[in-house]
Amino acid sequence: MLDVRRMQVLRAVVSSGSITAAATNLGYTPSAVSQQVAGLEKQAGLPLLERVGRGVRPTAAGRLLTEHATRLAEQLAEAESALTALRNGCAGTLRVRYFATAGAALVPPAVATFRAERAGVELDLKLTEPNDPFEELAAGRADVAITVLEPDAPAPEGMVARHLLADPFYAVLPRGHALARKRVLDLAELADEPWIDADCGTPGPCASLVRNACAGAGFSPQVAVESDDYATAQGFVAAGLGVTIIPRLGLGYAHPGVVLRKVRNPEPVRHIHVVYREDAAWNPAVLTLAEALEKAARAS
């Protein structure tokens, strides 16, 4: 196998026209340069230099290896430049996973802020469910994820979790419902109502949070209609088929046929976090996106 370092020594000899000049430029002794060239000739199986007066010139094999050495040097310089850009958070691809309501409320403004600061970094944005991203992160298929975690729960092993915001759930009632007269509802007041399950298609932390809150209020919801998104659930509520509770970020669009009321005793709240691997904490692009998400959360 050809020695890349010896190829660069040959390149220096060919560029300068003599072993002595190359030795001076490289900071080697002439003997060391001659040994490097001799070793490369042994690897190549062909002579690489021929004497011309007091200097040398490359043979056909010498010219061939010198050309390749030049290209290798250029590629190495490009690689070093690209690595520096990546290290400084100015290049590369950042793979971001998020769930729908966070995507609608937090991701667009965060991406706008990020691109203003890190225009050279490409963002790979994909929708996922809030219970899935840790597997994506652990497998190296994602760099940053937005998910729901308990506020006091430790981050999964090897992960950094930064709290973005507390997202309270609101009761969603048909207009004209008797409970709509109240500004704040005890969750138990919904115990006897037919229920629109807004999370039936996405079992995970949000659905568990709703079930646990209802259990804490002493009841299990009587599900009349199953829905797998918040907009559709509001449509069923507006039609008078039941009531539901939906997190505030899921109410960016409020159906004209419903009213929203705060809930207490208990107040269901989901805590949204941005998560990334500990071994990515050095990456300025990751940190910039996390800070942009925190800024978007403060403004939401």
Image: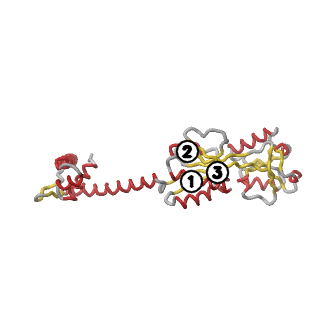
Indicate the amino acid at tag 3: Phe
Q: Is residue 227 left or right of residue 68?
A: right
Q: Is residue 258 left or right of residue 145?
A: right
The answer for how far apart the CA atoms under marks 3 and 2 are is: 14 Å
Helix, strand or loop at mark 1: helix
The answer for how far apart the CA atoms under marks 1 and 2 are is: 16 Å
Residue on which the image places disc 2: 137
Residue on which the image places disc 1: 289
Q: Is residue 128 above or below residue 254?
A: above
Residue found at x 56% / y 58%: 114
Does residue 52 show up?
Answer: yes
Residue found at x 67% / y 49%: 165
Indicate the amino acid at tag 1: Leu
Q: Is residue 237 left or right of residue 121?
A: right
Residue found at x 66% / y 47%: 272
Does residue 45 show up?
Answer: no
Q: Nearer the viewer, residue 155 or 192?
A: 155
Neighbor class of circle 2 (other Cα within 10 Å; few <14, some 14-19, many 20+) is many
Eye-nearest disc, 1 or 3: 1
Indicate the amino acid at tag 2: Leu
Residue on which the image places disc 3: 99
